[in-house]
Structure formats: structure tokens, C-alpha cells
Image (tube, rainbow, N blue to C red):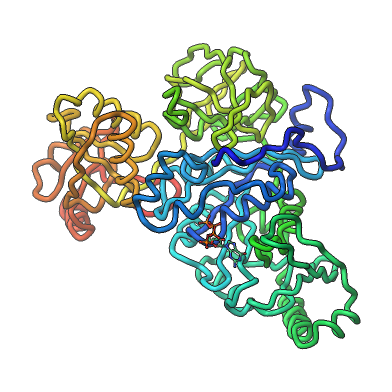
């Protein structure tokens, strides 16, 4: 985040529509919280929409710079790496908190990588809903598909924002067909555009039938003025654009593509909105929908699938660990999503995995690069705990009674590279860096039990994670490394009894992870299928936990 971003000193300029709860009432605090992520294929407009949400939430002073230096990030990897060094917020996922209509909105930022990464998946584990941004001209893109699948598998309710309607794009009905056909989620348009893509006039809110006309403001720097226009005037003033919209709306009513809360919360349908983040058209109604439609934090299920009541004493789980966010301090922050109770800075909580006490003296909110000490937090909020060295992704922190939330499942890696330090004198740094990247989930680190840390295999969902790993090894840990591709393409989870037989086979290797689990690597799926067909009784399980890939 650039330093010129002005964080409004008082984040609550909007009138409250909800009475503030009594202190200690975690369930009531949860009711007025919305914790969600914005996800999209790169360039669809996630960053722009994030900025505009902050604008409407009063957390960005109008026109005061941007969430990140987009121009810098464009295309070239080297530029992107420059931004990685600057720690733009699209690279390091953080949480942006602001108030809107008396609610506390926690917007979890997901990385803007071109590849899908574990990191995104983990952020989604901490979100109660997601807004999927589509480019009106491009529709469903590869990354969109993958993210949709992940949300679907996790049952994350999705709102869809068809963005860039100010530019020529597809037919709105064709876009709906594409969403339904390719993703299997039923889009239920809440707003409908008046004017084709490229000639955007306003939207009809299908819930009320109201037509809201927008006016452009220079560079979209302030909120777009909105005017409610009755249908007679709209017919007169918008001409064909109105006629077309009216026909399409009649068609939608006929097929009954209406919002259904149950289907939405079950991840089966997605309320859909049309707009232009750049010109702020349709941003307010979308943000209103996050408040009105997206679910508030609800009791989270523990390992035994028992819900932890929102009013139970504090509990939370770590969904992200990020090292070296502040180059001046070289610290390590564990991001904890609060699941129950009241978090107060300084309280001593228990780390479920080690049963050790953990003092929360250094609790921060991280807004891009800006940090503020957090004094308290409620269910749905995210707290950054500084130098929580023993805490790992998926771990639980709590106040009695004991609770442990389920681990966040890993993804099946599809790319495998061997990492070697370029300078053997820097082996210690190399080892430390590799361990850190593994913990953060930048890559999964696989070790040959005979070689130890000499030449670990880095396994990733997408190849860009290797670039991130190599860059960070060199710049943060002072351990430049060579990453060489391997012939492996498929991994399966195996166990100790199966390992010797697998090791003896050509084209198969068995590696270990830091947690003691074992992966069998195969050069092709065909080879894996042959092994499965020819050898009964070997443990070879798909790695993923969420019904994807593998
Ligand atoms: P991302 O985070 O999903 O990768 O997308 P981002 O917001 O960075 O937007 C990608 C490009 O699309 C940017 O243009 C941005 O201005 C543009 N954009 C976003 N929303 C809209 C919209 O509603 N309408 C139009 N016409 N464009 C939109 P850029 O030229 O690549 O960057 P910049 O020079 O504008 O910063």
C-alpha cells in the first residue's frame, strides 16, 4: 500500500442503523459484522472495487491515491517483484476494516497472483462470503473458474459483480448463461443494467423495481450521484436501452431467477450485480448487499463438528502467517480470525496445538502497510499477532473451555522443483527460508529422508509460487537458490508401510513433509494409474481436502 493513502481518522462517519451492543455481547457484535473476500481473475477489477468499497465506507479520503500502485504491477514479472518488495497489499493478504451503515466490514484481501495459490484458499477459509468480480467482456476466466470451484467446495456464499459495464462487453443474458453453464451456480440478478455494456446508464433493482440512474464523476474519485427515475420518464429518456432492459427483466421474472437466501447461503445460487467499479456505478448497491445478504459470523464447528457458540470465551484460528512484512523489523505476523467471544489485547490465551499459554501483548490490525494496535476484537474480526513464533496456519487459540478448529486442508500440488542454495556457505539461511516459506504456504516443502534439507523439492499449485519463493529466499533470507524443474507432475499422500515398495518403482519417489506426512510423486497420471491397477493395498490418497484437484 502506498504511503499516500489517507486512512480516515474517524472511521465511522456514516450514521448507525444498528444500536451498539452491550460490551461482552459477542453474538450481538457478530451480528453487525461482515467478513468477506473479493476474488477475481487478475485485471477483472478486484483492486479497483476494493478501493471503491473503502471510498463508500469512508475509509479512503476521496481521490487520495490508490490501494496500490497498479501501474507498477502490470505484466512483467520484474515489476511484479518490485511490488512484492514494496509489500503492496495485493501481495500480502491483509484485512481492511471499515464501518458502513453501522456495521463493521472486514474485507480480507487475497493475493493478486496470476496463479491460484494456497494463500487464497486459506483466506477463503476465514471469510464468511466472497464477492466474485467478472470482467463484462471476458466472462468466466480460468482463475475465476478455479476460485468458484474452491468457494463451492467450501460452501462459501458468493455474490457476483459483473464489472466494467462502462466498456463494450457481452450480452447480460449470455453472461448469466455462462455462469450457470460453466460453474453450475445459478446467478440471480439483483440489479439489471440499463444500456448495453459500453453505454451504461443505470441499474434496475429487481427487488423493488426501482431504476437508479448514475452520473459520472471525474476519475470516479467521489461517489457517483444516483437518481431514482420512474419508469415513464425512463422510457422517455432512455429510449431503446430502456425497452431492451424491460424485455430482459420480463424474461428474468418469467424464469424466476430471483434471489433465494437459502440457496445463496448453501452456495447454490449467486446474487448478481452489474456495475463499473471505475466509475462507481453499482458499487453502493453491491456494498449494501454485502450487509443485507451476506451472512454474519456464525458459530464455527470444531474438530468434532461441534459448534463453538459465539458467546463462548475467546477462540480463533490462524489462517495466515506472514514473515517480514515490515522489512525494518523482520517480524512474523500470525493472522487470527476471531470465532467466538471477546478478544482483548494482553489477554493470555492457550495455543491448542502446544497447550502453551500465549500472551497477546502485540496485537495489530494491518491496513496495507499501516499498523494500528488492536485493543479488542469480536467474532469475524482479524487480529495480527506479532512474533507468534510457535503458531502455524490452521492452529487454534482460545480461552477455556478448550477448543480446536479443524486444520485448513492443503492443495494437491501440480508443479515440483528442486531447490538448491547457490552459495553453500548460506545453507543455514537457505534452510530457515525454506522452512518459513513452507509454514506460510508459499510452497509445500518435500524432503528426501536421506538427503534432509540438501535439495528439497518445492511443490506448488501454480508455477508463479516458485518465483515468489526464489525471490524471497534471495531478498529476505539472503540465500539465493536455484530452482530446477523435476519430471514429477502428480502427488499422492502415502504412508510408512507403502513407502519402500513405492521407492523401489521406477518413476516414483517418496518424500516427507515437515509434519511427518509422506507424498509419493509420479511422473504422470498414467503412471500413477498403472501403479494403482497393478499393486493392491498401497496407500495412495488424493491430497486435497476440499474435493478439488488431486
Ligand atoms: P485486479 O485487481 O483484479 O487485477 O484489477 P484492477 O482493479 O487492477 O483493474 C485492472 C484494470 O481494469 C485497471 O486498468 C483498472 O483501471 C481497470 N478497471 C477496473 N474496473 C474497471 C471498470 O469498471 N471499467 C473500466 N473501464 N476499467 C476498469 P489499467 O489501465 O490496467 O490500470 P490503471 O492505469 O487504470 O490503474
- In the rendered image, the vertical position of residue 515 relative to residue 255, given as above or below: above
- In the rendered image, the vertical position of residue 137 relative to residue 19, given as above or below: below
Residue 463 percent across, percent down from the top left: 31, 51
Q: Could you say which quadrant of the image residue 18 lies in?
A: top right
Q: Number of labelled discs?
A: 0
Q: Could you say which quadrant of the image residue 527 lies in?
A: bottom left
- In the rendered image, the vertical position of residue 541 relative to residue 212, given as above or below: above
The residue that appears at 76% across and 76% down in the rendered structure is 253
- Give left or right: position of 351 versus 499: right
Tell me which image quadrant ligand 1 sits in. Answer: bottom right
- Give left or right: position of 439 versus 47: left
The residue that appears at 67% across and 37% down in the rendered structure is 7
Q: Is residue 31 visible?
A: yes
- Give left or right: position of 217 versus 212: left
Residue 202 percent across, percent down from the top left: 76, 71
The residue that appears at 51% across and 53% down in the rendered structure is 70
Which is nearer the eye, 254 or 428? 428
Residue 241 percent across, percent down from the top left: 75, 83
Amino acid at each position: 500500500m502506498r504511503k499516500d493513502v489517507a486512512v480516515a481518522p474517524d472511521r465511522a462517519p456514516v450514521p448507525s442503523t444498528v444500536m451498539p451492543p452491550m460490551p461482552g455481547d459477542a453474538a450481538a457484535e457478530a451480528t453487525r459484522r461482515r467478513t468477506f473476500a473479493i476474488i477475481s481473475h487478475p485485471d477483472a477489477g478486484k483492486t479497483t472495487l476494493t478501493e471503491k468499497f473503502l471510498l463508500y465506507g469512508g475509509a479512503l479520503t476521496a481521490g487520495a491515491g490508490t490501494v496500490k500502485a497498479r501501474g507498477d504491477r502490470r505484466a512483467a514479472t520484474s515489476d511484479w517483484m518490485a511490488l512484492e518488495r514494496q509489500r503492496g497489499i495485493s501481495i500480502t493478504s491483509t484485512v481492511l476494516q471499515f464501518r458502513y451503515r453501522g456495521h463493521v466490514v472486514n474485507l480480507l484481501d487475497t493475493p493478486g497472483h496470476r496463479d491460484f495459490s494456497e494463500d487464497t484458499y486459506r483466506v477463503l477459509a476465514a471469510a464468511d462470503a466472497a464477492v466474485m468480480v467478472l470482467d463484462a467482456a471476458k466472462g468466466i476466466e480460468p482463475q475465476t473458474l478455479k476460485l468458484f470451484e474452491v468457494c463451492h467446495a467450501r460452501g462459501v456464499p458468493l455474490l457476483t459483480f459483473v464489472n466494467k459495464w462502462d466498456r463494450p462487453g457481452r450480452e447480460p443474458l449470455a453472461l448469466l448463461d455462462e455462469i450457470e453453464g460453466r460453474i453450475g451456480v445459478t446467478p440471480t440478478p439483483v440489479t439489471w443494467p440499463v444500456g448495453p455494456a459500453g453505454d451504461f446508464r443505470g441499474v434496475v433493482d429487481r427487488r423493488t423495481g426501482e431504476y437508479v440512474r448514475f452520473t459520472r464523476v471525474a476519475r470516479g474519485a467521489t461517489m457517483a450521484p444516483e437518481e431514482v427515475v420512474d419508469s415513464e420518464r425512463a422510457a422517455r429518456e432512455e429510449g431503446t436501452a430502456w425497452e431492451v432492459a424491460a424485455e430482459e427483466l420480463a424474461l428474468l421474472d418469467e424464469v424466476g431467477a430471483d434471489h433465494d437466501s437459502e440457496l445463496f447461503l448453501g452456495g447454490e445460487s449467486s446474487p448478481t450485480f452489474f456495475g463499473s467499479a471505475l466509475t462507481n456505478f453499482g458499487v453502493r448497491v453491491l456494498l449494501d448487499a454485502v450487509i443485507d445478504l451476506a451472512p454474519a459470523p456464525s458459530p464455527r464447528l470444531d474438530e468434532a463438528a461441534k459448534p463453538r457458540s459465539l458467546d463462548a470465551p475467546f477462540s480463533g484460528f490462524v489462517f495466515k502467517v506472514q514473515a517480514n512484512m515490515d522489512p525494518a523489523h523482520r517480524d512474523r505476523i500470525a493472522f487470527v480470525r476471531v470465532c467466538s467471544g471477546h478478544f482483548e489485547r494482553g489477554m493470555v490465551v492457550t495455543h491448542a496445538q502446544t497447550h502453551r499459554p500465549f500472551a497477546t501483548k502485540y496485537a495489530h490490525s494491518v491496513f496495507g502497510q499501516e499498523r494500528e494496535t488492536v485493543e479488542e476484537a469480536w467474532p469475524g474480526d482479524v487480529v495480527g499477532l506479532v512474533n507468534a513464533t510457535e503458531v502455524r496456519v490452521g492452529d487454534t487459540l482460545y480461552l477455556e473451555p478448550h477448543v480446536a478448529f479443524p486444520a485448513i486442508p492443503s492443495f494437491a500440488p501440480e508443479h515440483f522443483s528442486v531447490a538448491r542454495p547457490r552459495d553453500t556457505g548460506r545453507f543455514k539461511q537457505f534452510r530457515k527460508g525454506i522452512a518459513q516459506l513452507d509454514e506460510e504456504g508459499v510452497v509445500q516443502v518435500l524432503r528426501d529422508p536421506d538427503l534432509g534439507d540438501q535439495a528439497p523439492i518445492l511443490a506448488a499449485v501454480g508455477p508463479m509460487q516458485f518465483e515468489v519463493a526464489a525471490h524471497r529466499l534471495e531478498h529476505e533470507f539472503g540465500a539465493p537458490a536455484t530452482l530446477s524443474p523435476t519430471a514429477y507432475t502428480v502427488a499422492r499422500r502415502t504412508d510408512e508401510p507403502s513407502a519402500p515398495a513405492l521407492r523401489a518403482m521406477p518413476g516414483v519417489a517418496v518424500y516427507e513433509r515437515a509434519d511427518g506426512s509422506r507424498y509419493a510423486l509420479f511422473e504422470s497420471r498414467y503412471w500413477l494409474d498403472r501403479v494403482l491397477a497393478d499393486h493392491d493395498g498401497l496407500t495412495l490418497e488424493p491430497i486435497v481436502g476440499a474435493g478439488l484437484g488431486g
